[in-house]
Image (cartoon, grey):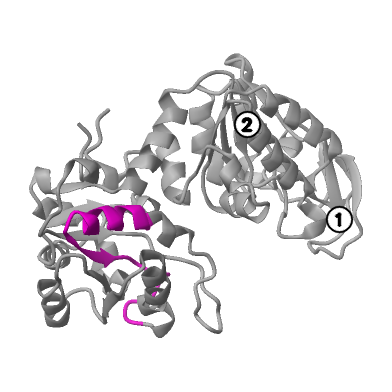
Amino acid sequence: MEMKTIDSYDFNNQRALIRVDFNVPQDKTTGEVKDDTRIRAAIPTIKKILNDGGSAILMSHMGRPKGGPEEKYSLKKVVARTSELLGGEVKFVSDCIGTEAEAAAKSLKSGEVLLLENLRFHPEEEKGDENFARKLASLGDVYVNDAFGTAHRAHASTTIVAKFFPTEKKMFGYLMASEVTSAEKVLNNYEKPFTAIIGGAKVSDKILILEKLLDKADNIIIGGGMAYTFFKAMGGNIGNSLCEEDRLDTARELLEKAQQKKVNVLLPADSKIGESFSNETKVGECPSNQITSGAMGLDIGPRAIEDFRKVILQSKTILWNGPMGVFEFSNFQEGTKAIAEAVAAATQHGAYSLIGGGDSVSAINKFKLADKVSYVSTGGGAMLEYFEGKELPGVAAIGMG
């Protein structure tokens, strides 16, 4: 599978319109960037274009504004951090289309960078409006998509805009290329034993990925709140633990399919429990299918950690999506931390590990292990949909060779 990346293109005297994902967490009071991972991830692509003698026009969304400009979602808050990381000035315009944006784009010189205001200040962005996409396209000579985090959305800037560029003038940035390559490696070029660790609150969010993994994985480890739906489906007592009553049949079916396909499904043998959803609650431990009525499971217990660790350490390919418990609470972070450490140890012994999406990424960063695993994905929803076997519009728009 050949991907057309910016590597094979000379950007000398070209204005590259780059879709980046600068939707970064900010401090609620100061608006300062709290986590610049996504900005850092885009820097190599921007630098390659500038080093070739081209200029860069960056477009991104931020948050979910309600149908018009909102100060708290303005991208001007990321200008300073982006300039710092690039080591040079980043110009900014207060709209992404219109005369001001057009004039700023036209006057860009080689080596210069322009950031456009939040695309979602125009409702046409999320609607995938052609006219809006055409206006964006008119700003650049070449289109580069480097926003894997939004590749599963058929929005104007991620998908429709590509229609207005000839094949040789649309391509993937480095981040997009590495995301797709890592996902492909785990999905289609994996070494066995392949272990998938699936956590998080709800079975319903993970049904499609679990179905897909039954055809690939040797082991599926299930943790987090979603585990209790499985225990209840098997007739266990789960007290006040999280449970999706309408998914009990689904949980039973998934376990039956796993048995038929000889996939080893591991549920946490024991849990750390509390009486309320807080860090201050009294902490206890008990088997996961024998939780008393006043208590709830908030993390996996020591036996579960041991069982899971053994399997992870024997694996050659590991996909991790979703935490094992409420790791935001220090008293219930042990399970997620132990799994992160086991994945890091397996990686040091030659396994390929992909941390895909949302909370698992926060966890791997929190425990300072991001550089000890093979790849940390920036795109939560996109990575999940890729593993569910869906075609990502942002990838399809550029086409794979």
Task: Please say if 230 is above or below 331.
Answer: above
Q: Which of the two residues, 336 or 212, is positioned nearer the viewer here?
A: 336
Q: Does label 1 or label 2 sit earlier along the sequence? A: 1
In the rendered image, residue 143 lying in the magenta stretch gets the answer no
Task: Please say if 20 is above or below 396.
Answer: below
Residue furthest out toward the left: 166
Residue segment shown in magenta: 42-69
Compute the Cα span from label 1 to label 2: 35 Å
Question: Where is mark 2, residue-wise?
Answer: 348
Judge from the rendering whether residue 152 lies leftward or rightward of residue 104; answer left or right.
right
For badge 2, the amino acid type reads: Gln
Secondary element at tag 1: strand
The residue at the point 65 percent across, 47 percent down is 323
Question: Where is mark 1, residue-wise?
Answer: 274
To which quarter of the image does residue 385 belong? top left
Would residue 388 be seen by someone viewing this image from the given angle?
no
Quarter of the picture holding the N terminus: top left
Would residue 9 be seen by someone viewing this image from the given angle?
yes
